[in-house]
Image (spheres, rainbow, N blue to C red):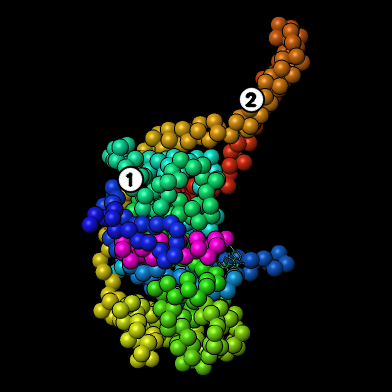
């Protein structure tokens, strides 16, 4: 059976979601991401005084390749901050060690092997799905890859992600779930080993959530990627699909392990889940402190202690062992043989040169201008109107030597007008520009 045929059908869904191993770039190595004593501090201001605020309090953890991990916790507990720090977006203010297998994280390597899919879908509204993918392929893949190969990879990925039938649809017409899948496909072009997703299920209905989680699960299980996402309050059905959950409470870890072990683990620490309760809701209630802050302190300490004893910190119980461990009543066990940090090395990706990137960005903008006719017509009309007005005011002035100062004002004014109207476009699209910078880890 070819890789293409290894399709995966989600339960009770109308859409097929498939993953594929067909990639132009060589498969990047499996990467086991772990971190020790991770702290993140920001500056806040109280009555003009700078005050340091700790958001992450020296947490440890480990996210394994081939697993889908959900970072959970109440709002404001530091989920996105943890994702930003791990992905290398928030460097200043953070301390502690982040490991890629046995090596300490290197910023360039991290950018090369990972991608970060943010909560907001930054897909270009006016491009079709296929055009978005093609531009991304031209911007991200090396020039040694031919245009035909890039096109075939785009088709392959669209097929894999279940969007080939929507290839010619303008992205603003896509549903929320389809946009999210397009965001993932855009990142899969470079074949990353680690995918970070910030609240991917927010705003999606239960069916789309299930489809998306199934897709992430496939990417983790079938292609041995390390998938880490933040999650708010999933349904019980969705919750148990994850391989691992990492629970934060006020910037501290209170649990890491398989979802099935949550209830027995807390029960062992005298926190009993009420019957018929969604375990995900129960987790959040514990993390908020509804079962007492004393329990939370105990849970911090136990998790920390387990982590200190374990070289790779927080719990990593392999899936096969889950049932057996559940039966034995063993929860946070160290798995030293599994956790050995493996050597990690990968070649940095050669991005296309600046002039090629500029060329593709230029054509992307031309397409977008052509599709946004109202905007283009408005700009042309404004320029014509201003030209007519200025030429009427300055009619016959050019030949009059007594009005040199007026001529100077004319040159100054027209230059200013042209510069500002050009700059305005930059200011309006500034948000996207910042995102692009972030995407390429420039800031
Ligand atoms: N640069 C910053 N300056 C001040 N406070 C910050 C900064 N960044 C994050 N915070 C604070 O850190 C806390 C954690 O923020 P974070 O966005 O990580 O929470 P979260 O768990 O992702 O929340 P949500 O689920 O609501 O998105 C919040 O209280 C937030 O206000």
User: 410 or 28: nearer the eye?
Assistant: 28
Residue at 57% of width from left, 60% of height from top?
203
The residues colored magenta run: 198-227
Give how far across and how far down residue 268 sits, in percent: 46, 92
Upstream in the sequence, badge 2 or badge 1? 1
93 left or right of 160 in image = right
Q: Is residue 213 magenta?
A: yes
- Residue at image point 35% right, 44% down: 155
Asked whether residue 419 appears in the rendered view, the answer is no
Instruction: Determine the residue positioned at 55% across, 72% down.
Output: 233
Q: Is residue 232 left or right of residue 214?
A: right
Residue situated in front as seen by the camera: 189 or 443: 189
Q: Residue at x 34, y 79 (%)?
A: 317
Residue projecting furthest to the top: 399
Where in the figure is residue 127, as x and y percent of width and height?
50, 40
Q: Which mark is residue 436?
A: none
Residue at the spot of label 2: 380
Label 1 sits on a secondary structure element that is: helix
Do the CB atoms of the residues marked 2 and 1 lie less than 8 Å apart? Answer: no
**In which quadrant of this rendering is ligand 1 seen?**
bottom right
């Amino acid at each position: 059976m070819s890789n293409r045929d290894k399709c995966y059908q989600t339960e009770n869904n109308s859409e097929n979601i498939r993953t594929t191993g067909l990639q132009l770039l060589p498969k990047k190595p499996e990467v086991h991401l772990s971190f020790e004593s991770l702290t993140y501090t920001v500056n806040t201001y109280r009555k003009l005084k700078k005050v340091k605020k700790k958001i992450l309090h020296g947490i440890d953890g480990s996210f394994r390749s081939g697993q889908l991990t959900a970072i959970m916790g109440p709002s404001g507990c530091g989920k996105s901050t943890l994702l930003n720090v791990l992905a290398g977006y928030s460097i200043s203010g953070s301390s502690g060690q982040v490991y890629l297998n046995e090596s300490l994280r290197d910023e360039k390597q991290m950018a090369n092997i990972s991608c970060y899919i943010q909560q907001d879908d930054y897909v270009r509204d006016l491009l079709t799905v296929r055009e978005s993918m093609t531009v991304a392929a031209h911007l991200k893949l090396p020039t040694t890859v031919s245009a035909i190969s890039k096109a075939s990879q785009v088709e392959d990925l669209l097929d894999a992600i279940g969007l080939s039938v929507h290839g010619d649809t303008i992205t603003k017409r896509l549903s929320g779930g389809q946009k999210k899948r397009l965001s993932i496909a855009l990142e899969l072009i470079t074949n990353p080993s680690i995918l970070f997703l910030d609240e991917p299920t927010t705003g999606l209905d239960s069916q789309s959530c299930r489809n998306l989680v199934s897709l992430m699960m496939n990417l983790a299980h079938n292609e041995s990627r390390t998938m880490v996402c933040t999650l708010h309050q999933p349904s019980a059905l969705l919750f148990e699909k994850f391989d691992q959950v990492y629970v934060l409470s006020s910037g501290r870890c209170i649990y890491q392990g398989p979802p099935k072990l949550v209830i027995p683990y807390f029960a062992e620490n005298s926190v009993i889940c009420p019957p018929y309760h969604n375990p995900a809701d129960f987790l959040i209630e514990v993390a908020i402190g509804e079962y007492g802050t004393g329990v939370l302190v105990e849970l911090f300490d136990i998790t920390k202690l387990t982590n200190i004893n374990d070289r790779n910190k927080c719990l990593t119980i392999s899936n096969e062992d889950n049932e057996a461990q559940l039966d034995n009543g063993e929860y946070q066990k160290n798995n030293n043989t599994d956790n050995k940090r493996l050597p990690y090395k990968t070649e940095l990706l050669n991005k296309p040169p600046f002039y090629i990137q500029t060329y593709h960005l230029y054509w992307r903008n031309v397409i977008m201008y052509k599709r946004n006719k109202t905007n283009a017509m408005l700009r042309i009309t404004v320029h014509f109107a201003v030209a007519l007005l200025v030429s009427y005011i300055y009619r016959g002035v050019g030949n009059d030597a007594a009005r040199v100062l007026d001529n100077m004002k004319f040159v100054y004014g027209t230059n200013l007008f042209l510069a500002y109207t050009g700059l305005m476009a930059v200011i309006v699209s500034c948000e996207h520009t910042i995102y692009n910078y972030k995407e390429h880890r420039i800031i």
